[in-house]
């Protein structure tokens, strides 16, 4: 495919994905905003008012970056896993596979759709947070980069889940038993320095810890993890998952019967 043709193919796939989740925004965007509002009310106002400051910030201010990123993670993942699996289930993924559109561009198209939904939901949650905190951003480029890279990473993870899934039940296993525990144990609601040394070391194997701290550094200027290390680890995971996704599509694993 020529470059112009690749652009048309990519933009068409991206537009389809955006229209897909925006058409049912009551199911895709609104629930996340409502859920995160409850987090702000319960954890931020009610419980947070009884807790000491963390790194010089009120508890509710400290957890805002983590809550925003939690919404981005869940929605980026959910958008791609549901969309790609639906394409498999309805048997129209073959139309993409037999088209001149290269597999890497198919991956980028679906991932871009996940990033679009993750970004929209992240913006919605950020607007909600303004009702509870005086939001400030210390390093805008770090914040934007952290959200963008995290959204890419979990969009890729959602695609891999969709490739292996054989039923709609299979696309809920990873979010329930892997994604949710890692998110809650990734420093969203606490500083890792508050943990005993052993559990601090265990937490270092959780990739979400690096993402949460990257965004927290961008917004508040504080982090439990070196920001350069965090960014490199996120980029490393992205490269690994993209390579693996491309391998799966090239081999037709989970797609061709």
Image: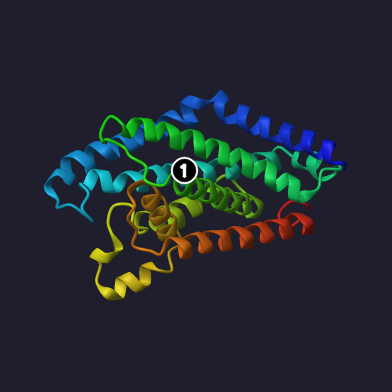
Question: Which residue is more in the foreground, 153 or 219?
Answer: 219
> Which one is nearer the viewer's eye here, 233 or 138?
138
- Asked if residue 30 lies left or right of residue 246, the reply is left
| Position in image of residue 15 (x %, y %) | 67, 30
Q: 207 or 77, which lies in front?
A: 207
Q: Residue at x 32, y 48 (%)?
A: 220
Whole-percent x, y for residue 134 in the image: 27, 35
**Disc 1 element:** helix
Q: In this image, 232 relative to 214: left or right?
A: right
Q: Is residue 77 left or right of residue 58?
A: right
Asked if 106 appears above or below 198 in the picture, the reply is above
Q: How many marks?
A: 1
* Quadrant into which the N terminus falls: top right
Identify the residue at horizontal 31%, vertical 31% (top origin).
Answer: 130
Q: Residue at x 87, y 41 (%)?
A: 2
**Residue 231 higher or lower than 2, as above or below:** below
Residue 85 visible in the current orientation: no
Residue matched to label 1 = 72
- Residue drawn at (72%, 58%) of the image: 248
């Amino acid at each position: 495919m020529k470059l112009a043709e690749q652009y048309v193919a990519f933009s068409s796939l991206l537009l389809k994905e955006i229209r897909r989740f925006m058409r049912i925004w009551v199911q895709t965007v609104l629930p996340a905003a409502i859920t995160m509002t409850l987090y702000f009310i319960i954890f931020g106002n009610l419980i947070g008012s009884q807790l000491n400051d963390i790194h010089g910030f009120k508890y509710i201010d400290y957890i805002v970056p983590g809550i925003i990123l939690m919404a981005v993670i869940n929605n980026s993942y959910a958008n791609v896993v549901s969309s790609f699996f639906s394409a498999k289930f309805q048997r129209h993924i073959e139309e993409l596979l037999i088209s001149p559109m290269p597999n890497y561009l198919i991956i980028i198209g679906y991932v871009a759709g996940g990033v679009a939904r993750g970004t929209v939901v992240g913006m919605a949650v950020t607007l909600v947070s303004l009702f509870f905190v005086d939001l400030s951003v210390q390093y805008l480029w770090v914040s934007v980069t952290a959200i963008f890279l995290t959204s890419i990473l979990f969009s890729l993870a959602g695609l891999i889940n969709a490739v292996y899934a054989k039923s709609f039940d299979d696309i809920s296993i990873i979010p329930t038993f892997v994604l949710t525990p890692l998110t809650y144990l990734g420093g969203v609601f606490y500083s890792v320095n508050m943990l005993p040394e052993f559990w601090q070391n265990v937490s270092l194997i959780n990739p979400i810890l690096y993402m949460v701290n990257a965004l927290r550094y961008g917004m508040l200027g504080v982090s439990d993890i070196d920001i350069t290390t965090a960014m490199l680890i996120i980029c490393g995971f992205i490269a690994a998952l993209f390579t693996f996704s491309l391998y799966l599509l090239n081999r037709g694993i989970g797609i061709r019967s």
